[in-house]
Image (cartoon, helix red, strand yellow):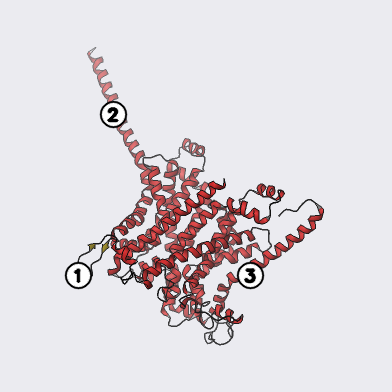
Amino acid sequence: MEQESKQALIEAKNADSTLVAFKANASRKSLGRAIFPYLLIFPTLALITLFTFIPTINSAIQSTIKPPRTVQQEAEFVGFKNYLDLFDNNTVIGQEDNFQRVFVNTLVFVAVTVPVCVILAFLLALLLNQKLKLTSIYRTGIFYPVLLPLLSAASIWAFFFADSFGMLNTTLKAIGLPPQGWNRDANWALISIMLVVIWKQTGFYMIFYLAGLQNLPQDIYEAAQLDGASALRRMFNLTIPLLNGTTLFVLVIAGVGAFQTADPLYALGEGNPANRSNLILYFIYQHLNEPRDRGYVYAMTILLLILLLVFTVFNFIFIERRANYED
Amino acid sequence: MKTDATPVTFTLNRQKIRWNLLITNVILIVVSIIWLMPLIMTILLSVRPKKDTLGAGNIFFGSGFSLEWFQSAFDSQPWGTYYLTTIIFVFGLLALQLLTITLSGYAFARLDFFGRDFIFILILVQIMIPSAVLLVPNFATVRFLNLYDTKLALLLPYIGSAFGTFLMRQTFRQIPRELEDAARIDGCNWLGLLRHVYIPSSTSGYIAFSLASVSAHWNEFLWPLIITRSDDNRVLTVGLGQILRSESGAQYGLIGAGTLIVVAPLLLLFIIFQRQFINSFLRSGMK
């Protein structure tokens, strides 16, 4: 009897300890299972934090600080003064031929190149979407600049813009028009940069429209044609609304790309004359190594980010609304 | 274009279609020539003899064919080193990106964990904040990490890819769960699942991402320019930048030759594989 109870006790103890061990094992296992997803996303999240989130927050903080001018001086919190200085005619950085001009240039640059590229891409895609014998040659001819670095695209165009013997001026002279100074002329400098970017990027957006066109439902078109809708009406009432998604996507990537254009300026005049062709990101690059402009440079970075954010959000709202309205 | 059933308008329509096709072709030929002109001129300028100045005579053709400009371009920069660095940069980056986006894409697509949706949206914010804009703070970070003028510094800011994570999450989510369940019954752990189920079924997603990544970073300029100093760590575009800067006066032949040295590999690959290349773009279509 005593032995039996002892036996039972031992068994119970054993059972208990295996249960405890089992429980411990389970909790370790479930702990592992709980941590596991975080381990998978850790590299991505950590690197994005280190090179996107922290730099953004850091820029916002640094943009409110005036760096010391001399060794004795200390850095000073100045609030929004750096931002105000950028647009102040009485500061070196803000006077009319400096940041003010560069800021306006960037807006003009985006406002011209994005619509021109996108409309041109759409029209070319419409033309290319027919059964043509030479389709692949046309496509290649228009698409290839996409693969070139922006810098070499610009260096290729340097010859086109050359003074007396450049391609464009030779052509102008041949048809009896006066030659221009192109990227050295105050009125033409920004237009020259725009030409390079339009030439380089149109083929890229054209591909997305071609993809969109090929996915359009054909039966709707046949129905519209039976109803006697003209080609122009079919384009405006069917094709364009049906491609709203593509247009939104293309507008966003074109705009985001245009806002951060800098490379062509390195090959074509470095923003000269007098910042007439300069853009914000290249201006930032030019002031990168000026310790006393540190606060300004961070303020410009934040401004550029705000422009990008506003642009993207605006596009989403605008196109979403139009899409809903047309439904 | 569909033709009408009635025979009277039939011939009319056919004529109209023929005119349409003719106009389409003429427009496309003109546009293609304008678009190809810069490349053609670059090639012509770079094979022009040095003694033929551009001011005198024909701008298209010189007095003969010569590789003098290419010789000068090759002598002026260590292109071999630049090529090697560019390849290490672009493909090393791609390998690291493919690894990290596969892991995070899988986690966001198929695992349940606290804060998942919040973290995912947080990561998506990065799509709106391009690394190029964060030139100054990232430069400071690299300096702080003591990585200035290293190959690692070239690729570090680009490894964490929100776009890639998003793309892989979408791709993985389209794979039927039954496949995963079947593989689990066969005794696959998560690594086996990725290897045998998820990765093999997502090749088109991987190809699209790789094409986008390689062509974007092969063309990178400003970041490599500011973050490197020695020839060993410089990439091709920076080499071209050196040519643009080093010469007094515009030596278009030299610039043309340098440009062609930089763009030739990608351009040749594209011309050979253009159908597959464009089709894979069309198919991945970012619908």
Number of on-image labels: 3
| Circle number at residue B191 | none
Judge the density around disc 2: few (<14), some (14-19), many (≥20) Cα neighbours within 10 Å.
few
Question: What percent of the width, then of the height, locates residue B54?
Answer: 54, 84
In the visual, does A316 lie left or right of A24? right
Outermost residue on the left side: it is A72
**Quadrant, the N terminus of chain A:** top left
Residue plotted at (54% across, 53% down): A246
| Circle number at residue B30 | 3
> Disc 1 vs disc 2: Cβ atoms closer than 8 Å?
no
Query: Label 3 is placed on what type of residue?
Result: Val
Query: Label 2 is placed on what type of residue?
Result: Val
Q: Pick whichever of labels 1 and 2 is earlier in the sequence.
A: 2
The residue pinned by badge 2 equals A20
Outermost residue on the top side: it is A1
Question: What percent of the width, then of the height, locates residue A322?
Answer: 53, 50
Judge the density around disc 1: few (<14), some (14-19), many (≥20) Cα neighbours within 10 Å.
few
In the visual, does A20 lie left or right of A321? left
The residue pinned by badge 1 equals A71
Query: Label 1 is placed on what type of residue?
Result: Val
> From mark 3 to mark 1, how far is it between C-alphas?
62 Å
Q: Are marks 3 and 1 on the same chain?
A: no
Question: What percent of the width, then of the height, locates residue B266?
Answer: 52, 66
Judge the density around disc 3: few (<14), some (14-19), many (≥20) Cα neighbours within 10 Å.
few
Question: What percent of the width, then of the height, locates residue A262?
Answer: 43, 67
Q: Is residue A183 above or below residue B143?
A: below
Residue plotted at (37% across, 59% down): B156
Q: Which of label 1 and label 2 is nearer to you? A: 1
